[in-house]
Amino acid sequence: MLRALVAAITACLLVVSWGSYHHSSSDDSHETPRREVSVTFDDLPVVGTRDIGAQQEITKKLLDSITSNKVPAIGFVNENKLFDGGVENERRVALLQQWLDAGLDLGNHSFSHPDLHSVPLETFQADVVRGEAVTRRLLTRRGKQLRYFRHPFLHAGRDLEIQKQLTEFLASRGCRVAPVTIDNSDWIFASAYMKAVDKADKQMMVRIASAY
């Protein structure tokens, strides 16, 4: 159960988009809504543990579930989690490679998850650039491009001018903002669950998992 909840920490955002309507082939007088769902996972490679063994297990289970259910998904990376003591850790980078091996995509979630509502735009932009280095390299090797960005905390800027400048900045780097329509706030449950784990409160662990 612990592994399941820790995996849930990674699954931060569920994005639902409604596609265009199409006519039913059997009766043109009726229209059937075409519903498309895309699931996005923030804060890759893993949140909640730095243990590489646990990260590998969580990543495998998560990707097995995504691929077996044919879920269209993309993971957004915080590249500061790929380093140990300032040195790039190949085993942590390999976790991102597993996403690409599974036929999924990766996006930029900044390097260190700064809050655009708390830091100057220039500082934020520098963190965005720093946060794309490894991800862009991995995508390029697969013949892909870095296309999407997700704001940390979903904070897009306190005013329209900042939002406009950031959008233009991202576009200059070949990226656009990945929108969010539903946020399941699972990190709240995950945080409570980990506190219960620290206290070895199995009853509370069961209650939190059941509530989630």
Image (cartoon, grey):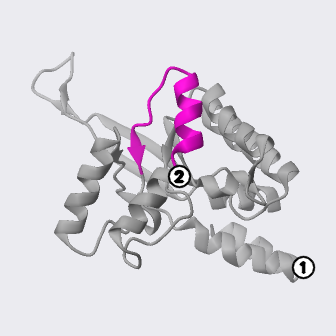
Asked if residue 134 lies in the magenta stretch, the reply is yes
Looking at the rendered structure, the kind of residue marked 2 is: Gly
- Looking at the picture, does residue 127 appear above or below residue 176? below
Looking at the rendered structure, the kind of residue marked 1 is: Ala
Q: Residue 174: give x, y in percent of width and height.
A: 34, 38
Question: In terms of image quadrants, where is residue 56?
Answer: top right
Helix, strand or loop at label 1? It is loop
Label 1, label 2: how many angstroms apart (C-alpha)?
A: 36 Å
Q: Residue 178: give x, y in percent of width and height.
A: 36, 48
In the image shown, does 146 or 51 lie closer to the viewer?
146
Please tell me which residue is depicted at 21% across the width and 22% down the height of the picture: 24
Q: Is residue 105 visible?
A: no
Tell me the residue that label 2 is attached to: 131
Question: In terms of image quadrants, where is residue 207?
Answer: bottom right
Question: In terms of image quadrants, where is residue 90?
Answer: top right
1 or 2: mark nearer the eye: 2
On residue 200, which mark appears? Answer: 1
Q: Quadrant of the N terminus?
A: bottom right
Helix, strand or loop at label 2? It is loop
Mark 1 or mark 2: whose residue is earlier in sequence: 2
In the image shown, does 113 or 1 lie closer to the viewer?
113
Q: Is residue 8 left or right of residue 135?
A: right
Please tell me which residue is depicted at 32% across the width and 65% down the height of the picture: 156
Which segment is the magenta one? Answer: 131-149
Q: Is residue 16 left or right of residue 103?
A: left
Asked if residue 179 lies in the magenta stretch, the reply is no
- Looking at the picture, does residue 59 appear above or below residue 42? above
Task: Estimate how packed mark 2 is, as few (under 14), some (14 to 19) or many (20 or more) residues with alpha carbons within 10 Å.
Answer: many
Q: Residue 48: give x, y in percent of width and height.
A: 73, 65
Q: Quadrant of the C terminus?
A: bottom right
